[in-house]
Amino acid sequence: MAEPKKITTPLTDDVIKTLHAGDSVLITGPIYTARDAAHKRMTEALSRGEKLPIDVKGNVIYYVGPSPEKPGQAVGSAGPTTSGRMDKYTPTMIEQGMKGMIGKGSRSQEVIDSCVKHCAVYFVAIGGAAVVISQSIKKQELLAYGDLGPEAIRRYDVVDFPAIVCVDCYGNDTYKDGLAKYSKE
Amino acid sequence: MRNLDVKDVKAVVSKLCIQSCCYLPEEVVTTLQAATINEESPLGKEILEIIMKNAQLAKETECPICQDTGLTVVYIEVGQEVHFTGGDLETAIHEGVADGYIDGYLRKSSVDDPLFLRKNTGDNTPAIIHTTIVPGDKVKLLVLPKGCGSENMGALRMLKPADGVEGVINFVLETVRIAGPNPCPPITVGIGIGANMERAAELAKHSLTRSMGEHNPNPKYAELEAEILRRVNLTGIGPSGLGGTTTALAVNIEYAPTHIGGLPVAVNLNCHAARLAAVTL
């Protein structure tokens, strides 16, 4: 396998343009956690004309609901959840300036189109590799929606978080490429 | 008649929750090892190795293999000679689940009202309990934590008898293709055939309690399991859905008598972390 590209957050358009579907990356910097319930609340807040509890501009959102950390751990097991459940909310988040997403699983055409239009990128992490992934998360801070428990918004400071570029800003989708290459049907 | 205190059931359920979430069964590890050797995609091979490393780390640190420690499905086989004492059996099971998820630092993923409130119950209860009464004076408990990434990709269809074997195969393949990367392949494909609507779904889920490497004792169904496994692995979905020749580790079928006019088929997918733990009291 090719050496992974090291990238840092927040992401700039210049960096995003160098990323291509299928590239392995190691992400360093702050990323923000949000999944179903947090996305619902955030988009409801926007529709009421309110501000988001976090500034998403240039930032990466990680679709994750971690298990509780044990004493002495920075974070519990924290692998990606299925991204498709956030598809409904994603174009709105990208319009707010969000530049990257980390999750697992396929995205809708609307999300892919939005990545092209606004120069954003969707990374996938290996589903179910939660302990391996959590080793790259060094620190966490609760930022909003604490009542949602595992679904709250947190900042994770990550070092060399392993992921693969799935949807690039050119509209390529590595899932489609992989399937085309290995399908024997 | 044998007396059994429900406190013992509660303690065992709690332990099984932690054990199943943190320790991947050895047969699953062995199957993953074999798959790594045969996988044609270099990235797929690398992913399978990471999955095994993850299982090893989880075991060493007693941390959940996956953050989604699921809804807790509990199978209890009760010998009819057993008399439970000290309280109510179902309450003891729910309390055991709550203890296990709190003491084991497992994620609480259960919400009370599915549609309106969706408030987290805070202790992963209620468990989904399947009880069967069997001869004898033993009690067998099996805990199957089931994450939603794979659970969401299941499907049920009421086929016609005329659809036959090809109809079943096509429906399963269609379900696996639609699921794609979402259920965290390599998956186990649980299939329930026959009975009626709800029993077909129960059979599909129950087939996931089988140890990996075991096949249906009926040779015709064992052959069908092998054929569906072969065809699922031709889809190209591969490890994590990123392309490859290992889409499923196993296909498990359970079947039951059905109506002259029906052929219900349910498909319940499991992720690569085919977690379960069992004990007999």
Image: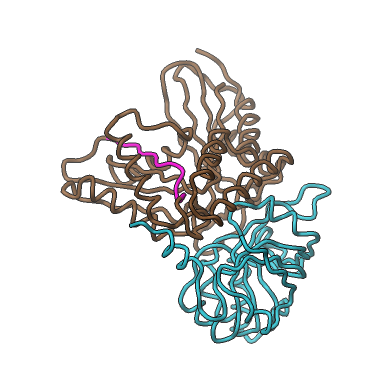
Q: Specify start and end residues of the magenta stretch as a single range.
A: B246-256
Q: Visible in this render: residue B127?
A: no
Seen from the viewer's position, the closer of residues A69 and B23 is B23
**Residue appearing at x 64%, y 43% in the figure:** B55
Confirm whether residue B198 shows in the render.
yes
Q: Colour of chain A?
A: cyan
Residue A93 vertical placement versus B187 (above, below): below
Q: In what quadrant of the picture does the C terminus of chain A appear?
A: bottom left
Which chain is depicted brown? B
Quadrant of residue A62 within the rendered picture? bottom right
Depth order, front residue of B4/B270: B270
Is B118 rendered above or below residue A11? Answer: above
- State the residue in front, B146 or A40: B146
Image quarter (top left, top right, bottom left or bottom right) of the N terminus of chain A? bottom right
Q: State the predominant SS element of the stretch in magenta.
A: strand
Quadrant assignment, res B275: top right
Where is residue A131? Give x, y as percent.
69, 50
* Residue at position x 80%, y 55% in the image: A74
Horizontal and vertical percent position of residue B240: 53, 56
Q: Residue furthest right?
A: A72
Q: Position of residue A68 (x, y in %)?
A: 72, 51
**In this rendering, position of residue B109 left or right of residue B156:** right
